[in-house]
Amino acid sequence: QAAAQKVVDDAVATLRNFEADRAQAWFRENVSKARALLIVPRVGKGGFIFAGSGGRGLVVAKDVETGTWSQPAFYTVGSASIGLQAGAQESEVIYLVMSDAGMSALMSTKFQVGADGAITGGPAGIGAQAATTDVLIFSRGKGLFGGVSAEGTVIHPDFKRNTAYYGEPVSASEILLKHAVRNLNADTLVAQISETAAAR
């Protein structure tokens, strides 16, 4: 549970960094439109983008009727197609899930952005294209190139970590859609997401 809590705490820091970063104006203006956020606090040497191995992140989903945000569900994120430029040390990445198709994909056992044309992904700030994109990716960090594509990213729930964090076997849909469990240690994260989404 301690390892999972560190992901939660790091996600809070990432949200605060995005909120304070002048270069992330497009993110701040559109986060309130997202159905869910996938936050990967640490990407870099040894991380999923640089090494092509597994990265740790979490998803928080919004109830479209009430506007409230769920408890976090932990996910594993991997990509072989995204790279860091030489000299880049570390970055933070947030995916905005913008559509029903994107939400449905999150509830599956595993999905790949861009696979079979089902889920589209790409960098933000492209105007009209953003309106038809299921998943948008935002990144910040020293040395990371500006145009980042989400294509090829493989995402799946981390059942073991979710079970450890909530103390019982629980699926991503039970956490994100049914609000079946709660960990009080995640309240700061939920509050921060609400603040970030409201501060447009």
Image (tube, helix red, strand yellow):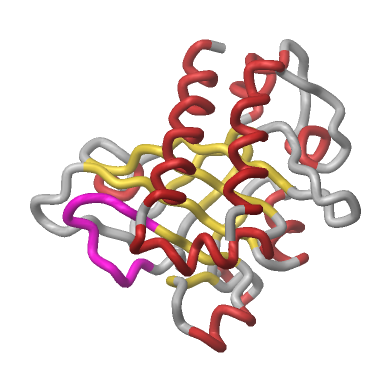
Q: Which of these two is toward me, 126 or 47?
A: 126
Q: Which of these two is toward me, 109 or 190?
A: 190
**Numbered marks: total:** 0
Q: Is residue 147 magenta?
A: yes
- Residue 138's place in the image compared with 72, above or below, is below
Identity of the residue furthest to the left in this view: 87
In terms of secondary structure, what is the magenta stretch mainly?
A: loop
Magenta-tinted stretch:
139-148
User: Image point 53% across, 27% down: which residue?
Assistant: 8
Whole-percent x and y of residue 104? Answer: 76, 58
Q: Which of these two is toward me, 48 or 200?
A: 200
Whole-percent x and y of residue 44? Answer: 25, 43
- Residue 173's place in the image compared with 165, above or below, is below
Identity of the residue furthest to the bottom in this view: 128
- Residue 159's place in the image compared with 163, above or below, is below
- Judged left or right of residue 73, residue 168 is right
- Judged left or right of residue 41, residue 97 is right
Q: Is residue 11 magenta?
A: no
- Judged left or right of residue 184, residue 25 is left
User: Image point 65% across, 53% down: which residue?
Assistant: 198
Whole-percent x and y of residue 171? Answer: 76, 32
Whole-percent x and y of residue 97? Answer: 63, 60
Quadrant location of the C terminus?
bottom right
Q: Which of the 4 image quarters holds residue 191?
A: top right
User: Image point 56% across, 12% down: which residue?
Assistant: 1
- Judged left or right of residue 113, residue 65 is right
